Amino acid sequence: MTLSSTFFDRIRSLARRRPSPVWRRFLALGLALTGVSTAFWPDVGHPAVTAARDLPAGVPLSASDVRVVSLTAPVAGSFSGADSVVGRILDSPARAGVPLTDFDLAAAPGDLASVAVRVADQGLADVVRVGSRVDVVSPSAEVLAENASVRETRGQVVVLTLPRRNANRVAAASLDHALAVTLR
């Protein structure tokens, strides 16, 4: 048996001892102060890309069109950096300060085209607004395009942004006839 003890023996003997009342009060005070300080700790927020100003549909986004803000709660589908949205095209108009999500942006920049359509019903042309979603129907009741975004309206002519594969069919059909649009 030796009188010298190892480091681990010393730790074990300290762990077996009961802390003094002064030490316990000091530890309790430290835990209370830690709890109080974290209650007032500022929330750093969740970064989200928002529109810097009101933006129309169908335009490619530039760095000056967007800004990154800190929100108190995360927004599903939002982007945390401006580089994620620069160059992409808005599917629908966006208000200033509103977070942009994956639903607001077109699938791929080269997949969309805009086409002007003469609407058969003037009354309906007056109801359609920029940012509305419509389906395009031919006179023979064939659906030429679904979920097209209205980019601009001028009298009986409506400019639609839709996938390029449908844009050619809609443009060809609109040469011969006025087309109908149905609101979604």
Image: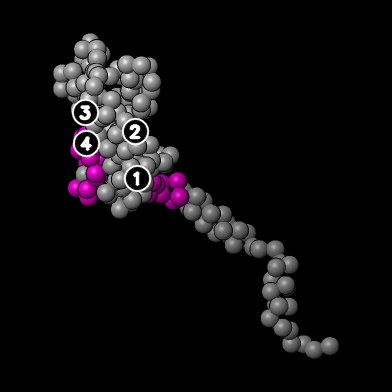
Residue at numbered disc 1: 108
**Predominant secondary structure in magenta?**
loop
Mark nearest the camera among 1 and 3 is 3
Name which residue lies at 25% across and 24% down: 174
Which label is found at residue 116? 3
Q: Is residue 20 left or right of residue 35?
A: right
x and y, in percent, of residue 4 in the image: 74, 87
**Which quadrant: the C terminus?**
top left
Residue type at tag 3: Ala
x and y, in percent, of residue 34 in the image: 49, 54
Say what secondary structure mark 2 lies in: helix
Name which residue lies at 33% across and 51% down: 84
Residue at numbered disc 2: 166
Q: Are marks 4 and 3 in contact (CB under 8 Å)?
A: no
x and y, in percent, of residue 89 in the image: 28, 42
Q: Is residue 12 left or right of residue 57?
A: right
Q: Which residues are magenta?
A: 37-64
Residue 99 visible in image: no
Q: Quadrant of residue 11?
A: bottom right
Residue at numbered disc 4: 55
- Give the mark nearest the N terminus, 1 or 4: 4
